[in-house]
């Protein structure tokens, strides 16, 4: 088990600096925020990136991620597939096992069956590309009220419908709480298909008012984190816990101080549950 850092937490922090800061503080891995890749690769090679990760003892946990994979036009989905291939090629070269993918907003007047079929179809196509490089797809349901897939149960139903062994699940503690996933649903999926867990907390506001910008560091909000993380752990999850917080005010903090505080609060909650 290790604690990872998700690069979307400070999106303006260049990847070069991010690698330095998170390794200095003591994270064990990194989810690479995809928008940071192209600027990095304008100056460095993929081989250099692999070397930097190895030298700093950082595991590449995931590429995060490919947005809005479903309900795309043919031309749009061609670009999605091209992005998947590009990320899969890089992932293979740096030893990154996973690409995070997320669903699109929900078109109006569609049934759940239509949403499931469309999303599963998109995942199949992307999974076939990723499989060629030995890479898995981590499907992340999102809490936003207009998202087409909002809960663990829905995400797991879609994953099963793909019929692909290299498609698994992401659980984000914010999305679990705000999207309305049930506690029972934590028992109803194959824990071996849980590829990564995003950890964070959230403000005490009505669910309909909460957005990603209301996320907090672990222990600073009202999420039932101990109960949630302990349940996942007891079911046998032994993978990474990756800190992902998109709070604008936090991004004004000194990066080193913020990164250190995030690791301390994440470690504390995992220690208190007995996971570490």
Image (cartoon, helix red, strand yellow):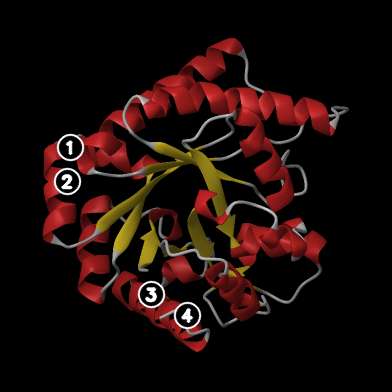
Where disc 4 sits, the SS reads helix
- Mark 3 to mark 2: distance in Å? 25 Å
Earlier along the polypeptide chain: callout 1 or callout 3?
A: 1
Q: Which residue is mark 3?
A: 258
Return the mark for residue 270. Answer: 4
Instruction: Give the vertical position of 190 relative to 260 (above or below).
Output: above
Q: Earlier in the sequence, mark 1 or mark 4?
A: 1
From the viewer's perspective, tell me whether residue 263 is left or right of residue 217.
Answer: left
Q: Nearer the viewer, mark 1 or mark 4?
A: 4
Q: Is residue 31 visible?
A: yes
Please tell me which of labels 2 and 4 falls first in the chain.
2
The residue at 34%/44% (across/down) is 97
Please state which of the two labelled residues, at mark 2 or mark 4, is closer to the viewer.
4
Residue for badge 2: 50
- Element assignment for label 3: helix
| Badge 1 vs badge 2, beta-carbon distance below 8 Å | yes
Identify the image quadrant of residue 115: top right
Q: Image check: 121 left or right of 97?
A: right
Mark identifier at residue 46: 1
The quarter of the picture where the N terminus appears is bottom left
């Amino acid at each position: 088990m290790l604690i990872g850092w998700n690069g979307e937490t400070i999106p303006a922090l260049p990847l070069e600096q991010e690698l330095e800061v998170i390794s200095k503080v003591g994270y064990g891995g990194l989810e690479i925020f995809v928008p940071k890749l192209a600027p990095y690769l304008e100056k460095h090679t993929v081989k250099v990136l692999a070397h930097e990760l190895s030298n700093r003892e950082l595991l590449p946990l995931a590429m995060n991620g490919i947005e809005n994979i479903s309900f795309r036009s043919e031309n749009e989905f061609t670009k999605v597939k091209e992005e998947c291939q590009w990320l899969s090629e890089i992932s293979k070269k740096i030893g990154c096992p996973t690409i995070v993918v997320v669903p699109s907003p929900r078109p109006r007047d569609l049934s759940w069956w239509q949403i499931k079929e469309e999303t599963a179809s998109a995942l199949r196509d992307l999974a076939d590309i990723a499989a060629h490089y030995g890479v898995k797809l981590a499907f992340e349901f999102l809490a936003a009220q207009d998202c087409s897939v909002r809960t663990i149960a829905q995400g797991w139903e879609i994953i099963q419908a793909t019929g692909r062994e290299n498609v698994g699940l992401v659980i984000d503690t914010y999305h679990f709480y705000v999207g309305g996933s049930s506690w029972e649903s934590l028992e109803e999926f194959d824990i071996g298909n849980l590829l990564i867990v995003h950890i964070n907390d959230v403000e005490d506001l009505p669910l309909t008012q909460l957005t990603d910008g209301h996320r907090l560091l672990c222990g600073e909000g009202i999420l039932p984190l101990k109960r949630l993380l302990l349940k996942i752990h007891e079911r046998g999850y032994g993978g990474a816990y990756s800190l992902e917080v998109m709070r604008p005010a936090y991004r004004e903090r000194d990066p080193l101080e913020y990164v250190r505080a995030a690791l301390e609060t994440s470690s504390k909650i995992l220690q208190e549950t007995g996971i570490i």
